[in-house]
Structure formats: C-alpha cells, structure tokens
Amino acid sequence: MNPGVFTWLFLLWLRSRTLAAATAEKSNVLFIMSDDLRTSLGCYGDTLAKSPNIDQLASKSQVFLNAFAQQAVCAPSRTSMLTSRRPDTTRLYDFNSYWRVHAGNYTTLPQHFKSKGYYTMSVGKVFHPGIASNHTDDYPYSWSVPAYHPFSFRFEKQKMCKGEDGQLHANLLCAVNVTEQPGGTLPDLESTDEAVRLLKSRASDGAPFFLAVGFHKPHIPFRIPQEYLSLYPLDEMPLAPDPDVPKLLPPVAYNPWTDVRKREDVQKLNVSFPYGPIPKDFQRRIRQHYYAAVSYMDAQVGRLLSTLDALGLTDSTMVVFTSDHGWSLGEHGEWAKYSNFDVVTRVPLIMFVPGVTASYSSPGESTFPFIDVLTQPEYSFTNARVIQTTVELVDIFPTVSCMAGLPALEECPDVSFQVELCTAGRNLVDTFYQTERGMIPERIAFSQYPRPADTPQNNSDLPDLKDIKVMGYSMRNWIYRYTLWLGFDPRSFQVNLTDVHAGELYILSVDPEEDENVYKKLNHNMVTKKMASLPPDTSLQTRMRLQLHYHTAGLKTDRGKV
C-alpha cells in the first residue's frame, strides 16, 4: 500500500476512534450568539478589548480567525446560519418573510438536534424575532418549548437614557444605572438568569440538551450598565485607523448608517447625509460605548460558562460562540453594519469540544472560573488552537452536528429549494484533528448585500425586498476581497450577470483595511471574453471565482503597484 494512503487511512481511523470516545454519550450543546459583535476581542488580537471570559473559552477551544457571515444584517444572517443555506436560497434579505413559506421548508440546526432526541431551548435573540421566524422563533419546529425573551427588552427602543438635561431620551449612547431601569434589570442580565435556570433544570436529566442563548449586546442602543465605561477611559479611545470614505468606493457600496442617525443624541449633531462625518469627540464616545458593551456581554458569557463548571456539565457540553455579523466603528466613514467590508462580515467563531480541544477536567478542577472584568480586566490567555483558513457561518450547522456525533449532512445541490436537510457550508471536522499547514487560498467566503439604488438612499441600509434593485456579491479569500454590484429583480429573485453597476477589488496583503479599490485598473475586456465561453448555467460563485483568478493572475500582492 502507498505510504501516503496508509497514513491517511490511519488518521481517519484515529479520528473516528477519538470522536467515538468523545461522543460515546451524546454531547450537550451550549450555543452562544452575540449580536453585532465584530472580532473586537482579546483572543482575536484586539489589545483594546477586555473580554477575559471569552478569551478563557478561546484558550481551551478551536478559534477560527477568519469566519465570515453571509449577509451583514440580523435576520438574513441568522436564518442563513441556522439553516446552512445562503440568502439567495432562504430568499430573506430583509426582515419581512419566513423561509418555510417564502422559500423552502428547510431543517434548522436546533431542529436537527431535536429530531435526534435532544431537548432544545432558546433564550434571548437566536432567530430574529417577528415575521422572519413566524412570530414564534420557529417553535415548535426548532424548539422543545417556546423561546424565552426577556421582559425588559420591550423598553430597549423607548426613552430610557438620561440626558444632560435630566430628561429621558431614545439615545444611541445609553449607559445606565441598572437599579433605575424597569424591574432593576436589562435584557442580557435576564437572559443569563434564564439560561442558568435552564442549565440547572437539565443537569440531572438524562436527555441531552441543545441550549441556544442569544445576547442582544453590543447591538445598539448601547443601553448597558454604566460601570463598564470605566474600563475604557475616553481620553484613551483611538479613532478608526481609516475614518474617511475611500475615494474610489462606489457610492452603491456605502452604508449611510440610517439607524444610527435616528437616535436623538445623533440627531442633535446635525450630521449631513449620507457621508457625515460624525464629530471626532462623538466618534470616540461611540467606540467607548461599543467596547463597554462587549465587556458587559463577556461577563454574561462568563456566568454561563462558570455554571457549566458548577453543575459538572463542562466535560459533556460542546460550547459554540459566534455572532451574526460585525459592526463598523468609523472605518470607511461608516457606522453600523449593512455592507460587505471585513469589519461587518468577519465574526468570532470559537468551538470548545471537551476531550478534543482541551483535556477533560480533573476532579475539583474548574475549567471556566468566572472572571469579573470590572476588577480583573487584565487577564490574558493564549488561544489553544487557531485556524486561519477562511470559513463561513453556513459551516457551523454541519460541523456542530458532526462533532456532536450526529450523521453528517449532505451537501446541497446548486438548487435546493425542495431539499429539507442539506448544507451549503463545509464540514470543518477535519480541522479539529489535522494540523493546519498554512492558509488554503482555495477557501472562499461569500457574502452579499442588497441596495435600492446606485447611490445612498434613506433605505439603503435595509431595503424591503420589493425595493431591491442591486445586489452586491462579495467573495473573500486570504489575499483578496472581490465584489460585484449586479442588477437584481426582486420579483423573480434573479440576478443579471451582464448588468454590472460597480465593482471592488482589495489586495489584502497590502491593504488589509480595504481602502484602495483597484477594480478600475483591471482588464475587464479580457475577462469578459473568457466568461462568454462558459455554459449559461454556470453558477455565480463559479463565475466570480474564475473572474478573480483571471483578474489577479498578473497582480502583485506585495507592495508593488497594480
């Protein structure tokens, strides 16, 4: 037998034995999702962030450094992640449709676990509430019991923020005295309390559980306990490294951050539409509040993880931590999400698998002791294992299922509206058992974002389906981000491949912040001729891969000019 084949078979056998041992009894799953969280965490190299509990989790987990969302807005991203289908298959680009009715009766991640005997529970914001999840958070399909939502969330958009005038306002910046809030609490505090209660209720039950906990922060408004601001002194807050709108950014690509503008404290700034800018002193305050919200959310994660320890559940519970998408903090002159840039599509993805990413705990040992960030903000950890290769949120469903010992999912066909259970993602199980030997350039993440027009409009951030005229398809590998803004028909859900409104190409090795668009310097005539020979049913993803290959074949990716 060929030695290479023998080695491969041995590794495959070893992996199956290890996985079988790790899942001899079904693993519980604690699935934690943050809202609008970019990679502003210590474990992702952000030296400003104080996130000791998540960093501690990362120190005993596998950390995917380059994970990307499929659309940078809540409902489409969450539906895509939890069904492992891309937005063009869920047909959800806004908040106004339910995939089971509008697209296909797709099985979700928690539904798959429920069908295999798991007791499935949802706390906080997991599915996007409302029409997008049938006003039930997809109960009873996905959950064994109705989803829990914190009572105090109903006050989130009300006038709860005390201003300098002593009156209450609906502000963007809303650090509060929690004891003065209705019920003396906040949504994420309530969600953590409920999640802890559920963990205690399942600790002595024989059935495995899948508990999803969705935290609302750092989503705006920044209604958070005021003490977390002290972690980030305002005079030490840096501005974004690239706060100006790039000169060659197509207007269709710009996000005019309309939802931020609606807040009372931002309205007082009288910022011009669409490009602003926001005054620098207020920019620093936004950044301060965002980071404080991250630290507040980190404390809630710490409470959950320490509860696993206290209940003796750590060695039998897989933990997944991620976010639906990121958030711009002044980069490119933008705020909020609603674009295709790295700062809004790149997200944390951390997976703890007991016995695989870390050894089982010894008797009396605490794997995740709670760290109070307010008194111990300087804790630092080293990531246990990192994966640099590009991955996507659609990869979570097949990976978590397989790591828990459930049958592997089949890959979706190009058209899968009639297929209930399949994945548009990639099963990442191999990454847990094989050492990564550098970046894999063939691994590509796809994202997309809709626009109502070629120039920024009041509804550019979140156009209703009927108003979508242009779809920005973006692909990202470890060297490039390539984006095409194409004509889109919302009635037929068809994209016009010949109707190119604009394009972007960023060479990340020399332009990691995506400020220098070199698209107009490319040889488009040559690529157009090559594309003409492709079969008409060639997928958009394949076409973009080929275009990127042809466009970049002669480009320099060092400091040389294009």
Image (cartoon, grey):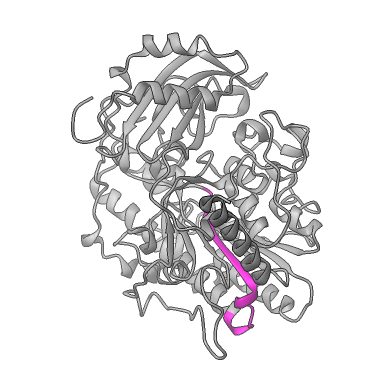
| Residue 170 in picture, x, y percent from top left | 47, 51
Can you name the residue that lies furthest to the front here? 1
Relative image position of residue 100 (x, y in whole percent): 76, 39
In the rendered image, the quadrant that contains the C terminus is top left
Figure label count: 0
Foreground of the two, 128 or 369:
369
The correct choice, above or below, for 462 with respect to 164 in the image is: above
Looking at the picture, tell me which residue is in the foreground, 453 or 488. 488
Q: Which residues are magenta?
A: 309-324
Evaluate whether residue 165 shows in this view: no
The image quadrant that residue 441 belongs to is: top left
Instruction: Establish if 204 lies above or below 9.
Output: below
Residue at position x 47%, y 27% from top?
545
Left or right of 408, for residue 284: left
Q: x, y percentage for residue 518?
A: 29, 24
Judge from the rendering whether residue 299 lies leftward or rightward of residue 230; answer left or right. right
Depth check: 266 or 232 in front? Answer: 232
**Which of these two is toward me, 497 or 450?**
497
Horizontal arrangement in the rendering, residue 247 relative to residue 399 (left or right): left
Question: Can the viewer see residue 365 in this picture?
Answer: yes
Q: Residue at x 67, y 65 (%)?
A: 211
Q: Which residue sits furthest left?
A: 560
Against 411, residue 538 (above or below) is: above
- Quarter occupied by residue 495: top right
User: Which residue is rendered at x = 41% and y = 25% of the image?
Assistant: 548
On whether residue 313 falls in the magenta region, the answer is: yes
Residue 255 vs 408, above or below: the answer is: above
Q: Magenta segment: does it hold 555? A: no
Where residue 480 sits: x, y (%)? 36, 34
